[in-house]
Image: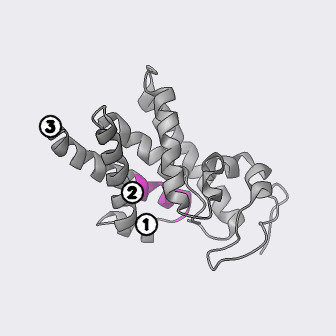
Amino acid sequence: MTISNDMPPPPSGSEGEGATPDLRFLLAHPAHFLALGFGAGLSPYAPGTAGTLVGFPLYWLLSGAPFYWAWIGLFLVVGVWASDVAGRALGVPDHGGIVWDEVAGFLMVLPFAPISLVGYVLAFILFRLFDIWKPFPIGWADAHVPGGLGVMLDDVLAAVYAIGVLLVVARWL
């Protein structure tokens, strides 16, 4: 594996899904820090779920911002870059530790959740369900769109599915 001068060596270890990121990897490059969801992607159990949970404090911080959707757009665009850089360094384009796609995707869903504990839990469950299940075209995008764009796109599509269900179900909550 060739590593460019501006990239740290990949973290040691392997789990059949490329190298295992660690704290050193997380802090070695700003793209790694972002792609790994500020460290949530280091979780040994369900890193995607941990990354999705990072969306809650970010949402509560940004929800009153006048340009909320501009922030989300920025998060998505920067996420393509960060996911691509981290995926190349880890040796797997969509490594399980890369969770910024879950963070940004879930931030798309939360504004449509009913403002209640039940509404937020439902939004979380729906987003995770579609992200894991990957009904068409999510699974197709996940399998056929390469690099950071593919990493981010399947979660954007999962967010669209979750939003659609929330819009239908929200009237009963």
- Residue highlighted by disc 1: 142
93 or 132: nearer the viewer: 132
Which kind of residue does numbered mark 2 sit on?
Answer: Arg
Which kind of residue does numbered mark 1 sit on?
Answer: Asp
Residue located farthest toward the right when viewing the structure as drawn: 5
Q: Which of the 4 image quadrants contains residue 110?
A: top left
Task: Give me the residue at 24% from left, 44% from top.
Answer: 166
Q: Is residue 23 left or right of residue 95?
A: right
Task: Give me the residue at 82% from left, 54% from top.
Answer: 6
The answer to whether mark 1 and mark 2 are in CB contact below 8 A is: no
Q: Secondary structure at mark 2?
A: helix
Distance in Å between CA atoms under marks 2 and 3: 21 Å
Classify 10 Å Cα crowding around label 2: few (below 14), some (14-19), many (20 and above).
many
Disc number at residue 100? none
Distance in Å between CA atoms under marks 3 and 1: 32 Å
Residue 132: image location, x then y, percent: 39, 65
Q: Secondary structure at mark 1?
A: helix
Q: Which of the 4 image quadrants contains residue 15?
A: bottom right
- Residue highlighted by disc 3: 171
79 or 109: nearer the viewer: 109
Pick the quarter of the image with the N terminus. bottom right
Which kind of residue does numbered mark 3 sit on?
Answer: Arg
Q: Which residues are magenta?
A: 146-155
**Main SS class of the magenta portion in the image:** helix
Q: Is residue 3 left or right of residue 21?
A: right
Classify 10 Å Cα crowding around label 1: few (below 14), some (14-19), many (20 and above).
many
Name the N-terminal-most of marks 3 and 1: 1
